[in-house]
Amino acid sequence: MDTRRLALAVALSALFIFAMQFILPGAKKGANGVTPADSAAMTRNGVRAPTQQTAAQQNGVASPGTSDIAAGTATGTAIGDSMGTVAAVAAPVILADTAIVVTRRDSGATFTLSNVGAAPIGVTMNAFANRVSGGKVNLAYGNKPLLKYQLVTNSQAAPIDLSGMTFQASRSGNVVTYQAPVAGTNVTIQYAIVPDSFVAHVSGTVAGAGGAANGSYLLVNMPSTFAATEPDTADDRGYLAYAYLSKRDPARNVLFKSLDPGEKELVEGPITWLAAKSKYFTVGLLAPKNGPGFTEATLVGGNRTSKVATTAAATIVVPAKSGSFAFDVYAGPQEWKRLTALGRNFEEVNPYGWAFLRGVMQPIAGSVIKTVLWMHSRLHLSYGMVLIALGLLVRLLMWPLYQSSMRTSLKMQVLQPELQAVQDKYKDDPEKQRTEVMKVYQSHGMNPLSPLLGCLPSLLPMPILLALFFVFKNTIEFRGVPFLWLSDLSAKDPYYLLPIIMGISMYLVSWIGMRGAPPNPQTKLMGYAMPVMFTFFFWRAASGLNIYYATQNLATLPQQWQLAHERKKTVKPTVATSAPVVKGTAKSPRVRG
């Protein structure tokens, strides 16, 4: 039994050692993206008033006249899905350069769209501060547009780059439409921004004579990087990744650092969604819920100026069936409720656990997040108190199982001398030895699997601990949340007090657990080694994770004390003896339970 426990402890330690390799990525600070300021000339609909010349002339395109208004999209069209409904409420307005749409000033996003390339050039998080450079988080990096489009038609041998073309723009409420003639076709791209969200419904058409639009495709280039937004920029940069979900395989996360420079990875369709993401934010393209999905995608490793990968490239192929296409763009925080509300399993953009454990860890992590958010909103507790309450709740639920486990251990200590005597007596007769060993187990109401089954309850809290380990890595709900002396539950304790408290509490659990037990060098070694190892593992871990695990340990102390006291009364000191044991009749003191 001691050997089995040692093997389990070593395996668990190895698992944690392996896990910690993934939380210490390195990188350097990156420049912050340009945050678009709200213009004083914005209208009450959130759009900059047209100047009739300005940027259109700067791009070498004549400013649109008033007659062009009639060429805009029809008004009064309602667009929406499960995320909400966007209605065209005003006559189209011809735009000269950019359209700014604010979904909600205090908690939503500010979308900035450009008629050059008909693409978003910035999405600002109105409620999230960039903690590196100040201001608000902007998902566009520098002066690069967030998305770039290319068009593939039957009449053209090579893709047509739309990013440098100037489109005629019109607006009706939160719906912005772009039109331009492209290689014998007329291309329309429309954005319907959902209020109080981070979502834009994108739709469009490719219309042309001679069947040029039939079988056409829109190639969408995803963001190649994001600005650093967290104080620990090295850790922040280590999370840059693409994630995707195909209809044939589970969601997959591809870190930038896992792609060598120039290395290409082809993702076969149909693809449900593809996302570029940083630690806390993501830009995702989602295929229509009932549609066929995207055709395919290509991921390419970016050039590296250091050992750290901070750039990559991804292009997804959007089919324009019968000359029309549609998809959703989510550009916002990785908030679990928002991601889940989008459907299409988009919450898996933040996959938990390594690939070989994801099938187990993802549902556990999801349940943990739901529980934490429910306790925070319904019980009106701070997240710090929620973690303490969660630790107490898990320990309370595990109390009966842990009690059973420890009493099984007590029974094993009682019958161990009898087992040893039987094994010594019948060491030359294996068949007889097995029979007599079974009789000893039966006389105590146990079986040979009891020791193993008794160990399982003590291991059941570990999946929750592992799930929390992944949850705290990049769950934005904990970002910048203070508690006691901590300024951020998602960051390490700046004074390292919590890892020390956690390690001391873990040692106390082991020390009390060994009281009254027969001397065992292996158990004693693990009682000292495991607290030291876990203190090392948790030294730079999220403060919230330390709070949870320290609470678990402290809540275990009363039960450990009770069982140690029970062991002291039940288990008598044993002295080695050569006296034979009467087959199946030797009775040692019974243990309650």
Image: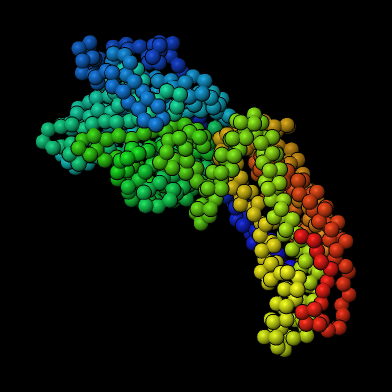
Most distant residue in the left direction: 210
Q: Position of residue 466 (x, y in %)?
A: 61, 50
**Whole-percent x, y for residue 552 in the image:** 72, 46
Relative side of 329 to 528, left or right: left
Q: Residue at x 87, y 77 (%)?
A: 576
- Colour pattern of the rendering: rainbow
Figure check: 422 above or below 568: below
What residue is drawn where x is 47% and y is 28%?
138
Seen at 43% across and 35% down, the residue is 342
Quadrant location of residue 443?
bottom right
Who's the residue at 20% across and 12% down the image? 67
Residue 355 visible: yes
Residue 19, horizontal then vertical, whole percent: 60, 52
In the rendered picture of this protein, how many numbered marks are placed on residues?
0
- Rendered image quadrant of residue 584: bottom right
Q: Quadrant of the C terminus?
A: bottom right
In this image, 453 relative to 90: left or right? right
Q: Quadrant of the N terminus?
A: bottom right
Question: Seen in the image, is 207 located left or right of residue 3?
Answer: left
- Which of 397/460 is in front? 397
Work out whether 298 lies above or below 11. above
Image quarter for residue 66? top left
Would residue 17 be found to the left or right of residue 346 on screen?
Answer: right
Asked whether residue 234 appears in the rendered view, the answer is: no
Residue 223, position in %: x, y? 41, 36
